[in-house]
Amino acid sequence: MSTASVLSEIDRELELSGRPTVLDEQAKREVRRAMLSAVCIPGYQVPFGSREMPVARGWGSGGLQATLAMGGSEDVVKVIDQGDEEGVNAVNLRRLIRGTLGCGTTADTREASIVQSRHRIPEDRMVAGQTIVLQVPNSEPLRGVEKSVRECNRMHAEADYSRIWVGMYEDLVTGGVVNTGAGYPVMVNDRYLMAPSPIPRWDVPRLNDSDHLTILSHGRDKKIYAVPPHTPVAPVTFDDVPFEVEFTEGTTCGLCGSADTFMVQTSDGRFLCSDVEWCRRVRDHDVDPAEHRVIAPLQYLPDAGKRVRATAEDYLVDPGLLADESAGFRDAVTTTAPGAEWTLKVSGLGKTYPARRGSSAVVAAADVDFDVAPGEALGIIGESGSGKSTVMKCIIGDEYQAQGDVRLAGFDDARTNILQLTPTERRNLRISALSVVYQDPAMGLNLRISAGGNITERLTAAGWRNYRAIRRRAAGLLDRVEVPLNRMDDAVGQFSGGMRQRVQIAKALATDPDVLLLDEPTTGLDASVAAGVLDLLRELLAERNIAVVVVSHDFSVIDALTDRAIVMHRGRVIETGLTDQLFADPHEAYTQRLVAAARG
């Protein structure tokens, strides 16, 4: 439906009834309930039963529904499109709201009880008792890094926002600044990530500890979220990288001469205040310039001297940036369980896949026992289907509903069976205490981002917030696993298989885990590449006093990397011993076949 035809319908409604029923009372109640919930949980996206609105495209049905649901005849409403209350959308939305609510309207922010806006917060200071309703074009701040709605919901529930930090890291690497314009991510009340996507960065500081209520509504996504008065709202940024607003040095408004407002550039090259009402009032001397300078985000103006772009080599070779090659690596002493010598202990581990139609239950692992001490590498060997990978997946948390007992010395002093933890708790363990290197690097890496960005994901998940420290750590790790630093900022998808595996190893070691699991670390690699990865792993394991479990079907890999080994067949452990003894004198016929295959 065209804008002209919609306006014609509105005019006809106004003439016939004076009060068109654009939103029925039941719909209004539903929207109001959603708004109350959103106010109670600042920054949280509350779903509501959005109705299709008889309005033209671009009018912002989410914002319109919020205004019509909360407003009444006693309100005074200001509608602005971008920063203009005289634009065609603003004029006709104002007409619709006035005709529906029977309320007053104004162009003066100071007189309004409700401001409905697209893309701007007015330059005037909004005060207690006022509400601004923002028409949101994109409600989900994680959409740029995760397409799955279910996964986005999980990330919000667990406050798992490391991918947002990775995106900022990648921006800083390539250009020295964060590229996000409207929709710069913020943390609300130190809990929920929010993208105030209608507004430019210039307006973001106005959300923090504001006197007014902010409602953000997206009609198509059917989501409402809110920032109540006096709520902490902080732009997401690294500790050592200042948040910046949009500003072109030396610009002033071509009409009023202001230099402390958000400005837009016209086709003739001039800059004008985006807030048309404010610009007009400046010319009429109807503003308090000193008051405006207090609320203008001048402390966030761009400062080229504080930007951080540097080559990867700078972060490695400058002694002021990196003290030594082992900076940040684990100390010589690793945690062991009280009164014991192990870091990881597995007892009676089993996994049974339930029967399905036409097939019986499958016992993938049964009664598996072993422990691993600090500085020790244990091998689990067996052919495909033997249960070795199932054991690894149960430990790392890729498989749930396993039987038995798995304890980590560094978690709750080994008092808790980690198999009984929730999925969220298991994922948290994988950030610090447990790491895994998968056979397929695509399972452990994001191939679309850089090598440094992959390491950044793990570090930021662990709480690192200093860009330079992250850059230093990533450069040191990649250099140690022999990834050329001139490739540090290249997407991992451009790397060879062996190079990807090296990046995955660096990422796994980034937070100095207590336990490292290696799942077929050389399978699928060319023989020469596999030999290089094995040499690297031998060196790395010798340097670090951590517990290592190596899963492989290749006895030569187990022989090269481990001290002890267990042999699995049909889900059960059939032989154990020192690796060199098993290789030299295997007792079981199955083990003898594995050794014979390794000897060629």
Image (cartoon, rainbow, N blue to C red):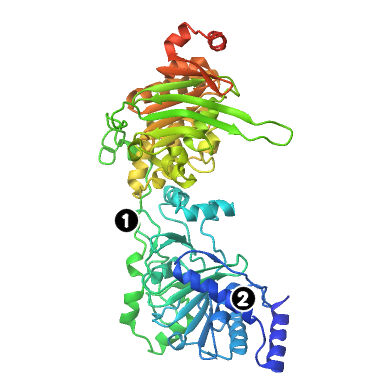
Quarter of the view holding residue 320: top left
Secondary element under disc 1, as helix, strand or loop, is helix
**Is the residue 46 above or below the residue 563 in the image?**
below
Residue type for callout 2: Trp
Left or right: residue 123 compared with residue 12: left
At horizontal 42% and vertical 49% (from top left) the residue drawn is 169
Question: Is there any visible trace of residue 481 in the rendered image?
Answer: no
**Is the residue 383 above or below the residue 11 in the image?**
above
Quarter of the view holding residue 279: bottom left
The residue mark sitting in front, 2 or 1, is 2
Residue 120 has which mark?
none
Secondary element under disc 2, as helix, strand or loop, is loop
At horizontal 32% and vertical 56% (from top left) the residue drawn is 305
Give how far apart the Cα atoms at labels 2 and 1 are. Answer: 41 Å
Residue 59 has which mark?
2
Q: Earlier in the sequence, mark 2 or mark 1?
A: 2
Q: Nearer the viewer, residue 466 or 547?
A: 547
Badge 1 is on which residue? Answer: 305
Quarter of the view holding residue 413: top left
